[in-house]
Amino acid sequence: MGLLDLEKHFAFYGAYHNNAFNVAIHMLFVWPILFTGQMILYFTPPLLTLGFLPSVLLLNWGFFSTLFYALFYVALDYKAGSLAAFLTFFCWVASSFVSSSLGFSLAWKVVLAAQLFCWTGQFIGHGVFEKRAPALLDNLAQAFLMAPFFVLLEVIVCHVYLDWSL
């Protein structure tokens, strides 16, 4: 599969998400997984410092993973990828402020609870509704990279379909 072949990525990920309930579960839980992942990465040490950024925005592993996701999404599709990149950076900024406000001793507990809840929901969605193992068991990296973008594309497709059907 080509690294920047959106159609093949979408087909791979979509093959594991045919049931409407499972797709809805993913729409609810994928972005919180990304958000809370960014929260815990907030506590990694800065790799670069720029004086003009607010002190809460650290150029650490959280930032650079966000940058990687954003660039990957834009490379896959300029329009939808730009929206995904914006949302990814919005989550990074928001998660930085939340993490800074909570402090590590509370933030890791919030992250743990949210990750357990969201991952459990997704595994239930696959087991009960999809009756198929999740994509991450076949291609972990591809599933983690594509999940937020796939969910966003699903929302866009649903929105366009609903607008056109009215």
Image: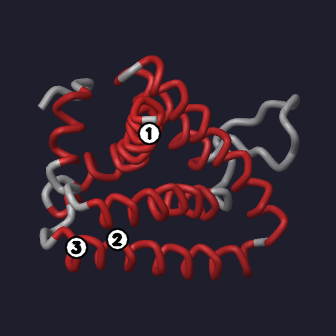
Q: Is residue 68 left or right of residue 103?
A: left
Residue, disc 2? 122
- Residue closest to the eye, 106 or 59: 106
Q: CA distance from mark 1 to mark 2?
A: 25 Å
Q: Residue at x 45, y 43 (%)?
A: 155
Judge depth for marks 2 and 3 and give the one in front.
3
The amino acid type, in three-letter code, at marker 1 is Leu
Q: Which residue is farthest top?
A: 78
Judge depth for marks 1 and 2 and give the one in front.
1
- Which secondary structure, mark 2? helix
Find residue 45 and report its image quarter.
bottom right
Identify the mark nearer the N-term, 3 or 1: 3
Residue, disc 3? 129
Q: Residue at x 28, y 51 (%)?
A: 143
The amino acid type, in three-letter code, at marker 3 is Phe
Q: Which quarter of the rendering shows the N terminus?
A: top left
Q: Is residue 84 left or right of residue 109?
A: left
- Which secondary structure, mark 1? helix
Judge depth for marks 3 and 1 and give the one in front.
1
Residue, disc 1? 162
Task: Return the x and y of residue 158 as percentages of the image width and height.
Answer: 41, 42
Q: Is residue 158 above or below residue 113?
A: above
Q: CA distance from mark 3 to mark 1?
A: 23 Å
Identify the mark nearer the N-term, 2 or 3: 2
**Does residue 35 appear in the picture of this structure?**
yes
Q: Residue at x 63, y 82 (%)?
A: 109
Task: Return the x and y of residue 4 as percentages of the image width and height.
Answer: 26, 24
- Which secondary structure, mark 3? helix
Query: Which class describes the residues within 10 Å of circle 3: few (<14), some (14-19), or many (20+)?
Result: some
Find residue 121 and report its image quarter.
bottom left
